[in-house]
Image: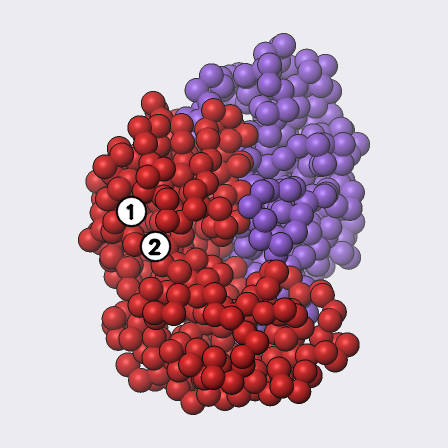
Chain colours: A purple, B red
Amino acid sequence: MTPGAFRDRFHLPKGIYMDGNSLGPLPLAAAERLRRTVDEEWGDSLIASWNTHGWMNAPERIGDLIAPLIGAGPDEVVVADSVSVNIFKLAAAALIARPDRHVIVSEPGNFPTDLYMIEGLRRLRPEVELRLVERGRVAEALDEDTALLMLTHVHYKTAEMFDMRALTKAAHAAGALALWDLSHSAGAVPVDLRGVGADFAVGCGYKYLNGGPGAPAFLYVAERHRNTLISPLSGWLGHEAPFAFDDDYRPAPGIRRWRAGTPPILSLSALEAGALLFADVDMTDLWTASQALSQRFVERVEATCPGLTLISPRDSAGRGSHVSFATENAYEIMQALIARGVVGDFRAPEALRFGFTPLYQKMEDMDAAADILAEILQAESWRAPEYANRNAVT
Amino acid sequence: MTPGAFRDRFHLPKGIYMDGNSLGPLPLAAAERLRRTVDEEWGDSLIASWNTHGWMNAPERIGDLIAPLIGAGPDEVVVADSVSVNIFKLAAAALIARPDRHVIVSEPGNFPTDLYMIEGLRRLRPEVELRLVERGRVAEALDEDTALLMLTHVHYKTAEMFDMRALTKAAHAAGALALWDLSHSAGAVPVDLRGVGADFAVGCGYKYLNGGPGAPAFLYVAERHRNTLISPLSGWLGHEAPFAFDDDYRPAPGIRRWRAGTPPILSLSALEAGALLFADVDMTDLWTASQALSQRFVERVEATCPGLTLISPRDSAGRGSHVSFATENAYEIMQALIARGVVGDFRAPEALRFGFTPLYQKMEDMDAAADILAEILQAESWRAPEYANRNAVT
């Protein structure tokens, strides 16, 4: 695909948005869809919309839209809750499925919420051990005590990619299950969950899927586990017959059992519109375009900004769809960039992070953004006092 | 307040809506607010909105709007996740807070998801016992093994109200904690969580609070526990400094620690507009108006529909803001009512349920609804074949 090919399907502010890996911009279809959901569905049809407008099965329907982007099959993906809560469900299910094992292996510096949720699980199951090992030593850390290998496919800061196939295989060889966090992968790089034999995955709706701020997350359970495991967050909308109002939980067949409570329909509507955009996208083509964008940006930044150090893999095939540069004063530099219309992220303590989203970024955006960055560094305009105000929280 | 006093603040479909206890209708302000959140905040300001448009602290801000409706203080209520997930958080926290106790007491026929979530908790902590006892015997079932008393204040079907003060006291006398589900109370009847000394509460955003379909839920933790307990669903937005990206979880001070993942901002926007309507409402006045509505309806139904049996408390002070009648063919009768514009709920296996919402219902609606019900029963028009199609799921 040509970078920028879907540009007219988005509402984009002026400037160059390089933060679609944090919050995707507004698809025009999402605004229109939300108006319909609010005015016609909630407003006019009210409670009947659970049936007549498909609210009840929206989580499975949107899951089926996301499935082809991550190599999942039908009825293997459902939209529910947040990445955090879904991590808890699946990690707990893994411990229940491997009752003689107590170790969860992950890496230090994984996205924090993934680690925090395991800490929370340990409050209920103090015998559980969270074993954090450096990236290169993950395979050797898997042993007969390991219930679960939990990793983020694309690192949120460096964009370094794990070899999902090799590590899933290593987890299985040790008798463990494998859970992949696809928050920085889904809609950005090709993923083949079935092909690599992954057991579980979770991922984010509000980044590359353009599902809106805080969009609900997705969850994948491989078909072979789908009907044998039960979510420990066994809420009523994962029940086989929620409106039978039985006292006893009977898990629904299929992926639906991984839902918990009543889903936030307004947020789901926007996410569905975002996910639908990908119906016309081939992930391999998109990934090729993403690499072209990031290579162009990295080359130009490195040629013009000698003070910055690339902390992402140099080979674009080994990283996800963002890059980070380390520098002193990264916070102030990013504020100065944003003031000039180039929106990326500061990631504490030292990183400038830039996301690549070929749906709406053009090749010439890369040169323009790099040039603005170079100007800011050369003129030291980031030293202006207004850029030192640390109230940013994203 | 005069019943119907806020009618012009809602988009109401034709007919008589008696299902605001299942899904509140659309406040005009919510539609307007969502347009702003979508077009200006997400569309124009994108990621900056986490700060500039107050997305980051929306869960606490909306919690503070809900607090006065349920007798809570500032920083005691936060909006997060679903009722189901919040039940899990608090029940798990109670077990951790009472490590020498393993029993959770509740009633059979409690709203199913509350019981299902404890079943899920038992998958992680098999030693936990869920002790279900009939309503009248709850106090005597509390003993030295009881960690938590978990009840729904207003029963979802019969609207029978528990004596929150007496039962909280009984729980404390046994050394247990008390968790109240306010899903059918918040915004409907006065609640005094601080006054009765409740430890925990949860409740629903999409019913009487008119927060939109599947609106996020709220959670209350009494000030005395707020900083001593830690959520087992310890996600990054409950961390003291989420953007420090530490590997270790440090719970935020105050109610914020009970958040988990990134909140669904679009759904929160609508909920905020719904909750803001209550700024002008005195809950005691609203409750008086609700009782006037329900008494009028019950009297007229009982006078004209001899085949129906009231299964809610006859004394309006002993029930919440809905009533249910038992009858054969309740499903078909409700479908026939809905076809005539009177929207209530069928609750399996035998109940017609009607909600009272003085913000937009008028006294004359009660007579009109009862008369349509009487006509349907007298003419047996519910026997028409189209009313037998059981695809309804709400």
Above/below status of A47 relative to B203: below
Above/below status of B65 relative to A165: below
Which of the two residues, B132 or B53, is positioned nearer the viewer here? B132
**Residue topped by disc 1:** B167
**For marks 2 and 1 on the same chain, the one whose residue lies earlier in the sequence:** 2
Q: For residue B190, say whether it is visible.
A: yes
**Residue topped by disc 2:** B162
**Could you tell me which secondary element the residue under label 2 belongs to?**
loop
Number of other residues with Cα within 10 Å of mark 2, as a class: few under 14, some 14 to 19, many 20 or more = some
Which part of the image, by quadrant, shows the N terminus of chain B? bottom left
Q: Could you say which quadrant of the image residue B329 lies in?
A: bottom right
Above/below status of B371 relative to A239: below
Q: Which residue is drawn at 63% across and 35% down?
A: A230
Left of A51 or right of it: where is B68?
left
CA distance separating discs 2 and 1? 8 Å
Q: Which residue is drawn at 49% across and 19% down?
A: A128
Q: Where is residue B139 in the image (x, y as percent from the top left)?
A: 32, 42
Q: Are marks 2 and 1 in contact (CB under 8 Å)?
A: yes
Which of the two residues, B198 or B375, is positioned nearer the viewer here? B375
